[in-house]
């Protein structure tokens, strides 16, 4: 009897053994393997964005996405009620996310690990999490229009986050390994895959202190003047390095969705407008370079002038004036500018504008940068030369305009503006940015003459006497341009600007300020001048540039 | 080679066979053979020891895995803590926060930059006084020595010291590599609203000077 029983049991066991080992062996082995093999994505750490002194403007931190398996949720309302205070979300909205039949859905993205700990302590059925990284901008809107922002998936969507996406992102890895019951790796188990390669850090030329000063000064001025917006560019003319690039109004890259898309653009690079009187400096450069006139050339400036059937006025009516060429620039006389510009051919004027970088991208490689507009001489009408000479009928970005003045500040050599100082690989190798391209535009003596002429602009009798910084020699030019509105193809509102440099006899800084559509006034000196003065005096301190101790030469504006 | 090889083939042939055989004899006793039981025991013992060693090895490895797991968790927790603290520092470190704190201390912005050149003690720039009454020095003087003491401790010319004190100007000393004139650096005495703190060394032997404090 016992024998029979034993035989039966042994036969059953044997049969099962044969079944497992022979019949379903492959399936069983695969199942076992799938239960212990895990594949996880090794997230690449995104590179940081730093200012010129290494202060962090953008970095990535460990975070968690809260997810839900809706089929496991028993009481969506109760769970939503419990989650709401921790996530700071609306309970009803949460309930909608929890209820349903989906096996996987997002409840909240990028919460801090501390928040997840609180949630996980509640042990709510169906609530899970996945590890992720979150992009944070510790200084908020500081340099936001340069740095840019990322989307939900962590990819750059604007500014340098977008422009340098490939460099910043690095490369995700993927690891496959065996785990034991508790989720721990089996030490002797098989393991294969590739490790993630972290992204590179990008170091900017921006100095965040100057950037902050520029941003707060222009933001305040935009509010006061009830303007549509404004820009500030601070540049080192000798190296082309942009020390500050402010755009107002701006946005908080930590929550880009809550801002006006227009405010996320870098207006100083993406918006082109007619330069107005700041363009006169290029006309003067051509005039001096071609020996058509000298700074002391005497001109009789009538109240109006007729060119090709069109009557030109000055901004303010005046009787016939006797101005020197310096006086024409200091008082920003359109008619005086036309008088000397008519001695140039269209090709010559066009040639100088082109060499100053008008109508071409600056070469900074910023995404979405505008080219501006400069018509070719063959398309010029009879009034093109006089209007272009005083800054109408062409358009420039704020950085292009700043670059023109930087060229004059740098003794006539244009240095391509740059925003990125260096990049640092994840292994610590530093790659300095290539030396920027340079080209001579005007002679050093012409540049020096132009600077002296521009010092007259901020002298008594000039259009911007209010921007003087005591102790320093400042040179600059005001502009009040009518603003061309593409939607109505008409002139609507103004752009008031002031671009200047200091110290005038050995310039180390160029600051360009533009105010778009100010409503309380529209003269460049009064509107943009105060911002220039604020930012320039701050930047001189921050960059430790002492006054040169020389005196401005006395120049005659009239005769 | 030495002159006399001991055995040549001829020598071998010369040895009589009988003598060689005569020299062979049985080794007495020989080693005692292990009994079957004992052999089994030894083998069993070896197997047990081997298995125990494997078990020990696995235990150690598993323990290592546990340790790694715990340490990894610890590392993650510390990284999270570090990130949190770094973010807190970053928030305090922003130019905006620094300006706010400087203003809370009664410091004001300087609109006209003024420099003290260490080489000859010359004050460069237009020295101005700040409107308003002078705020009392904060009781916690961790980073703000009195302007007069700062001026006195500098070896710069007496003219500049006089100018500084009359105009309520305190030389701002930052992390600076002075040129040919080394001045003992009083700690602190920040430039009002100069924002981001120590940002590089002085290259031209000139330092910004604040125009005192006002309320």
Image (cartoon, rainbow, N blue to C red):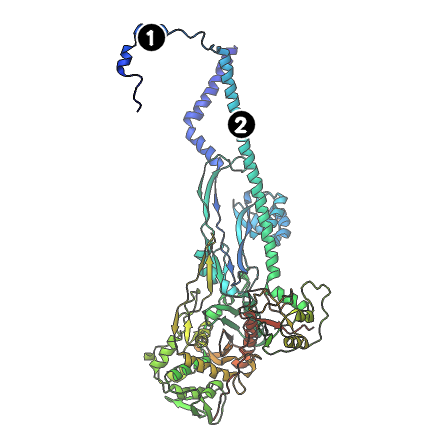
Apparent side of residue A53 relative to residue A291 in the rendered image (left or right): right
Does A558 sit above or below residue A349? below
The structure residue drawn at horizontal position 47% and vertical position 68%, both measured from the top left corner, is A241
Can you give x and y, in whole percent of width and height, for residue A155 in the image? 47, 56
Identify the element where label 2 is drawn.
helix
- Residue at screen point 63% across, 76% down: B160
User: The numbered mark 1 sits on a residue in which chain?
Assistant: B
Q: Are marks 1 and 2 on the same chain?
A: yes
Using the image, determine if residue A42 lies above or below residue A451. Answer: above
Q: Are marks 1 and 2 in contact (CB under 8 Å)?
A: no
Residue A521, picture quadrant: bottom right
Place of residue A8 in the rendered image (x, y in percent of width and height, measured from the top left): 48, 16
Assess disc 1: are there few (<14), some (14-19) or many (≥20) residues with their C-alpha within 10 Å of its C-alpha. Answer: few
Looking at the image, which residue sits at the far left? B10
Q: Is residue A391 visible?
A: no
Q: Residue at x 57, y 38 (%)?
A: B67
Q: Which mark is residue B181?
A: none
**Vertical arrangement, residue A455 with respect to residue A545, above or below:** below
- From the image, tell me which residue sits under label 1: B20
Q: Which mark is residue B55?
A: 2
Most foreground residue, B14 or A495 = B14
Whole-percent x, y for residue A543 in the image = 54, 70
Coordinates of residue A210 in the picture (x, y in percent): 55, 69
Mark nearer the N terminus (1 vs 2):
1
Q: Residues within 10 Å of mark 2 (few under 14, many from 20)?
A: few
- Which chain is disc 2 placed on? B
Give the SS element for disc 1.
Answer: helix
């Amino acid at each position: 009897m016992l024998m029979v029983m034993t035989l039966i049991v042994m036969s059953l066991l044997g049969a099962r053994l044969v079944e497992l080992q022979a019949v379903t062996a492959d399936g069983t082995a695969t199942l076992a393997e799938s239960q212990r093999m895990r594949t996880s994505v090794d997230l690449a750490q995104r590179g940081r964005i730093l200012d010129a002194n290494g202060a962090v403007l953008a970095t990535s931190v460990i975070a968690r996405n809260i997810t839900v398996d809706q089929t496991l949720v028993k009481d969506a309302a109760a769970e939503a009620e419990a989650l709401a205070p921790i996530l700071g979300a609306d309970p009803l909205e949460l309930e909608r996310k929890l209820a349903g039949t989906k096996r996987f859905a997002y409840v909240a993205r990028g919460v801090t690990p501390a928040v997840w700990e609180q949630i996980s302590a509640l042990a709510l059925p169906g609530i899970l999490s996945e590890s992720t990284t979150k992009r944070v901008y510790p200084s908020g809107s500081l340099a936001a229009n340069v740095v840019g922002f990322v989307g939900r998936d962590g990819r750059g969507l604007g500014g340098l986050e977008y422009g340098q996406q490939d460099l910043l992102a690095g490369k995700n890895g993927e690891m496959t390994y065996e785990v034991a019951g508790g989720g721990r790796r089996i030490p002797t188990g098989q393991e294969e895959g590739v490790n993630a390669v972290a992204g590179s850090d990008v170091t900017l030329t921006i100095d965040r202190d100057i950037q902050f000063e520029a941003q707060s000064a222009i933001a305040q001025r935009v509010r006061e003047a009830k303007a549509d917006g404004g820009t500030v560019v601070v540049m080192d003319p000798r190296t082309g390095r942009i020390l500050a690039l402010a755009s107002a109004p701006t946005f908080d890259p930590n929550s880009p969705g809550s801002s006006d898309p227009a405010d996320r653009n870098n207006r100083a690079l993406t918006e082109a407008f007619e330069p107005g009187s700041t363009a006169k400096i290029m006309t003067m450069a051509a005039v001096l370079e071609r020996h058509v006139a000298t700074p002391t050339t005497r001109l009789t400036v009538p109240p109006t002038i007729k060119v090709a059937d069109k009557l030109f006025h000055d901004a303010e009516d005046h009787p016939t004036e006797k101005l020197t060429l310096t006086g024409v620039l200091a008082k920003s006389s359109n008619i005086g500018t036309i008088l000397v510009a008519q001695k140039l051919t269209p090709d010559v004027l066009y040639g100088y504008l082109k060499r100053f970088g008008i109508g071409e991208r600056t070469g900074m490689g910023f995404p979405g940068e505008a080219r501006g507009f400069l018509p070719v001489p063959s398309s010029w009408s009879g009034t093109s030369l006089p209007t272009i000479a005083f800054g109408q009928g062409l358009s420039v970005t704020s950085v292009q305009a700043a670059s023109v003045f930087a060229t004059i500040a740098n003794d006539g050599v244009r240095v391509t503006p740059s925003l990125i100082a260096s990049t640092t690989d994840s292994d610590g190798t530093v790659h300095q940015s290539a030396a920027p391209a340079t080209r001579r535009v005007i002679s050093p003596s012409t540049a020096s003459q132009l600077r002296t002429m521009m010092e007259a602009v901020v002298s008594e009798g000039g259009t911007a006497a209010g921007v003087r910084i005591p102790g320093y020699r400042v040179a600059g030019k005001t502009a009040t341009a009518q603003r061309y509105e593409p939607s109505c193809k008409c002139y609507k509102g103004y752009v008031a600007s002031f671009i200047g440099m200091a110290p005038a006899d050995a310039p180390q800084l160029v600051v360009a300020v533009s105010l778009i559509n100010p409503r309380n006034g529209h003269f460049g000196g009064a509107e943009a001048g105060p911002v220039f003065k604020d930012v320039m005096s701050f930047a001189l301190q921050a960059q430790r540039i002492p006054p040169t101790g020389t005196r401005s030469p006395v120049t005659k504006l009239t005769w | 080679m030495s002159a006399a090889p001991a055995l040549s083939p001829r020598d071998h042939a010369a040895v009589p066979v009988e003598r060689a055989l005569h020299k062979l004899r049985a080794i007495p006793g020989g080693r005692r053979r292990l009994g079957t039981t004992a052999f089994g025991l030894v083998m069993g013992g070896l197997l047990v020891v081997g298995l125990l060693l494997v078990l020990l090895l696995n235990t150690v490895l598993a323990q290592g895995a546990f340790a790694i797991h715990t340490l990894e968790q610890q590392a993650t927790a510390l990284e999270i803590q570090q990130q949190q603290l770094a973010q807190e520092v970053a928030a305090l470190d922003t130019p905006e926060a620094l300006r706010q704190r400087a203003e809370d201390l009664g410091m004001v912005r300087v609109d006209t930059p003024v420099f003290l050149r260490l080489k000859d003690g010359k004050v460069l720039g237009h020295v101005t006084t700040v409107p308003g009454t002078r705020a009392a020095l904060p009781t916690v003087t961790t980073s703000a020595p009195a302007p007069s003491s700062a001026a006195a401790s500098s070896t710069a010319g007496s003219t500049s010291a006089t100018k500084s004190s009359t105009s309520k100007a305190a030389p701002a000393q930052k992390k600076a590599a002075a040129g040919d004139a080394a001045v003992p650096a009083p700690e602190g005495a920040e430039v009002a609203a100069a924002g981001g703190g120590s940002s590089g060394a002085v290259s031209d032997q000139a330092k910004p000077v604040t125009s005192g404090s006002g309320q």
